[in-house]
Image (spheres, grey):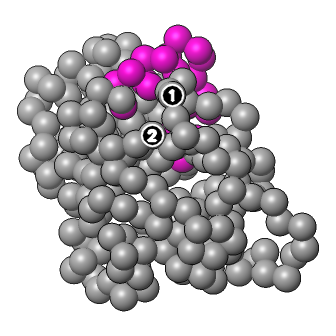
Amino acid sequence: MELITLNNTLPRVFAGQNGITSDVWLRDLALERGKRYLISAESGTGKSSLCSYIYGYRQDYSGTIAFDGKDIHQLNVAEWCDIRQRHIAYLPQDLRLFGELTAIENVELKNRLTGYKSHDEIGEMFKTMGIADKMDSLVSKLSIGQQQRVAIIRALCQPYDFIMLDEPVSHLDDENNRIVADLISKEASHQGAGVIATSVGYHLKMDAITYKL
């Protein structure tokens, strides 16, 4: 996948509202593989909705979203499975970790499906993130910042053309923000992938093309 395009897209809940000022909604927008994008938003402007639309979780919008020119409404179940396995990696804002599993079990649960990273490579990412000592801890016992880093590692354990991260550093300090940004940039560059990160005020520390939602 080389290109994600939005054409006159708008959440249906915003239909009929006047004075929408956005670089994304009701615009023609092209997100290219290999480039970095920051979607800066205020609460309630549809940030997480945008991610859900692109990932195919929700369809309550008007206009068009397309992958390489194909309207995503035309994709079948098999095509969506392929997209989520090989083309778009996604970190949701609510992380969707399993609290009854350990940090490493949460990551390996995905990596067993993709076979993308070796155990040593995963261990190195935990070390880079500063949570190597938490690999065998239950996720429910970790801080929210530690959970964010576990979920980011999990998101990186697959091939992708784009990685989409919904508020990836909302619970991290500046130093851990920098570490996370460096790791994401390194991994995305290795795959020639695009990065789409959203934020409400506190941004991923990465040079990026910025759009205001």
Specify the quadrant that holds the N terminus.
bottom left
Residue 30 appears in the rendering = yes
Seen in the image, is 23 located left or right of residue 118? right
Q: Mark 2 vs mark 1: which is more N-terminal?
A: 2
Residue holding disc 1 = 207
Residue segment shown in magenta: 166-184
Q: Where residue 210 sits in the image (x, y, percent)?
A: 61, 41
**Residue 178 colored in magenta in the image:** yes
The residue sitting at 48% across, 60% down in the picture is 30
Which of the two residues, 170 or 136, is positioned nearer the viewer here? Answer: 170
In this rendering, the answer to whether 206 lies above or below 160 is above
Helix, strand or loop at mark 1? loop
Q: Amino acid at mark 1?
A: Asp
Helix, strand or loop at mark 2? strand
Q: Amino acid at mark 2?
A: Arg
Residue 165 appears in the rendering = no
Q: CA distance from mark 2 to mark 1?
A: 7 Å
The residue sitting at 70% across, 48% down in the picture is 212
Which of the two residues, 34 or 106, is positioned nearer the viewer here? Answer: 34
Residue holding disc 2 = 36
Seen in the image, is 68 located left or right of residue 53? left
Which of the two residues, 164 or 7, is positioned nearer the viewer here? Answer: 7
Cβ–Cβ under 8 Å for marks 2 and 1: yes
Which of the two residues, 189 or 123, is positioned nearer the viewer here? Answer: 189
In this rendering, the answer to whether 108 lies above or below 161 is above
